[in-house]
Amino acid sequence: MGCGGGGGGDDAATPDAFDPALDAAPECREDADCANGLACDGEETCVEARCVAGTPLRCDDSIDCTTDFCSEELRRCVNNPADVDGDGIFDVHCVDARGMPFGDDCDDAAAGVHPGAVEICDDMAVDEDCDPATRGPDADADSFQDGRCCNGTACGDDCNDALRGANPMATESCNGIDDDCDTRVDEGVLVMGYRDADGDGHGDPSMAMSACGTRAGFSTLGDDCDDGNALRSPDLPEICDTIDNDCDGTPDPADSTVTATWFADEDGDGFGTSSNAIVSCSIPSGHWSLYATDCDDTRATVSPASAEACNGRDDDCNGVADFVLPSGDLEDDDHDGVADSRCTPTPVPADCDDLDPASGPGGAELCDGRDNDCDGSVDEMVASYAYFRDMDGDGYGGTSGGVMVGCVPPSGYTTRGGDCDDTNVERHPGAIEHCGAVGGLVDEDCDSAVDEAPASNECLPVRGQVQACIGGVCRPVGCVMGLSDCDGLSSNGCETMGDC
């Protein structure tokens, strides 16, 4: 953009050892007699025993998005690409003369957006890491990203990132959720059966229905003679209670047995467990049951005959907390034992994100842009990433300056390491390699090589000689097209038009 010499922003040269407009050129015997020690005003030469001023370095690279100037400190032109947000990463839209980007910052107006940034599943669909392929977390590690997370218009395709078995490549199973992410629930997998109101495993033949085979209150058998009484079922033994227990049409005592096994029913809900059992024909005194199928014998509201409630628990003993909210949404989709906040009434505690097993009351806060502990704050008190001290502000840090761990980078720190000189803003990974610098050979891009391409591009022809960067100095390596060096003198360069 700008150009010029002497560290200024125009094309004027810093005054030489003499001003040819005011002074007679001093006498000299060699070029060294004329040197003034400045780089930006060009190289002074001794011609016919008189000093001749040099040609000021022109630093304008004709690229609008670079800031161009000549640095006396570095003794060369500096062409800094755009870095509006000051994160040390050049704007990907700022390109060189070949059309190649100087950097890879996809949003140079936002310091938190650049390659290597943490991708956040945010409502604004910001592409924090400048990689459209990363749209957010894959909490269930099934190689499909959360469908609620987007980068621009591209979103993840996992409709339930809390369950590994639910993704676009999964097979639909009968479980009340959309396994294959086609927006339909349990399509093609429901089975025909009957309502089982008393939870004895046998349904009412007059109450046909279709459902999942594991659903509580459902049976594929339609042979219960009394679906309102768990003491009557084709699987039961005939006991001494004057009713037809085994549904064969003949009550006791004509059809009785003395070998019935009774299970202790601690909560009195009609279902017990196998931990305590006795054998008796008649009903024992106290709470006993012919069924050892209670999944929680301390709660009378939990049994195979209970209705499922929206509380994060398995109330009907079918093995899962599956109270249905809107179709395809269950009370505890992420199986963390905490009910969805959408339950009515809202449970206490409530899961603020029932599709994220890493989020729930009392959970550990992670650096992921989500309220993992459901306290209304995001990413508070999280230590998850290493940040390197960036003392020179070039966007890269080194271990010598100190490393901190945190979720949000502290002021003066960066996620990018590898800076080989954190006291020099011109030296860091990805910097442009220049031909030499003050103090001798310098590895600007921290790749352990010195003066590699494009360093020689800065060596302009001098006195008709082509220059290349050799040992940190621009040295003649030949003549420009159309000129020849016929006398072999370095003082006058390539002095002959055409061939010798």
Image (cartoon, helix red, strand yellow):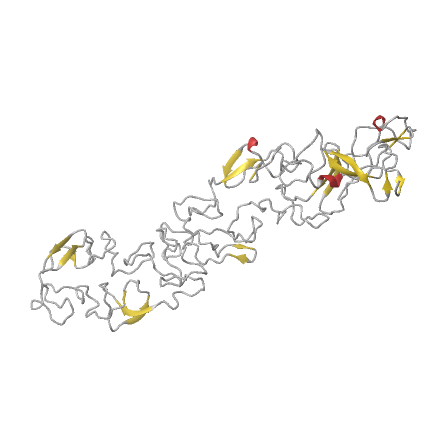
Q: Is residue 313 left or right of residue 420?
A: left
Q: Is residue 412 left or right of residue 250?
A: right
Residue 170 vs 471, above or below: the answer is below
- How many labels, in total? 0
Of the 4 image quadrants, the one containing the N terminus is top right
Q: Residue at x 82, y 28 (%)?
A: 36
Q: Residue 67's image quarter?
A: top right
433, 220: nearer the viewer: 433
Q: Residue at x 67, y 45 (%)?
A: 102
Query: Outermost residue toward the bottom?
Result: 206
Q: Is residue 220 left or right of residue 449?
A: left
39, 127: nearer the viewer: 39
Q: Residue at x 14, y 57 (%)?
A: 262
335, 237: nearer the viewer: 237
Q: Residue 285's image quarter?
A: bottom left
Percent of width and height locating residue 253: 7, 67
Percent of width and height locating residue 264: 16, 54
Percent of width and height locating residue 20: 90, 32
Of the 4 image quadrants, the one containing the C terminus is top right
Residue 113 vs 70, above or below: the answer is below
Percent of width and height locating residue 5: 79, 36
Query: Outermost residue toward the left?
Result: 254
Residue 83 vs 23, above or below: the answer is below
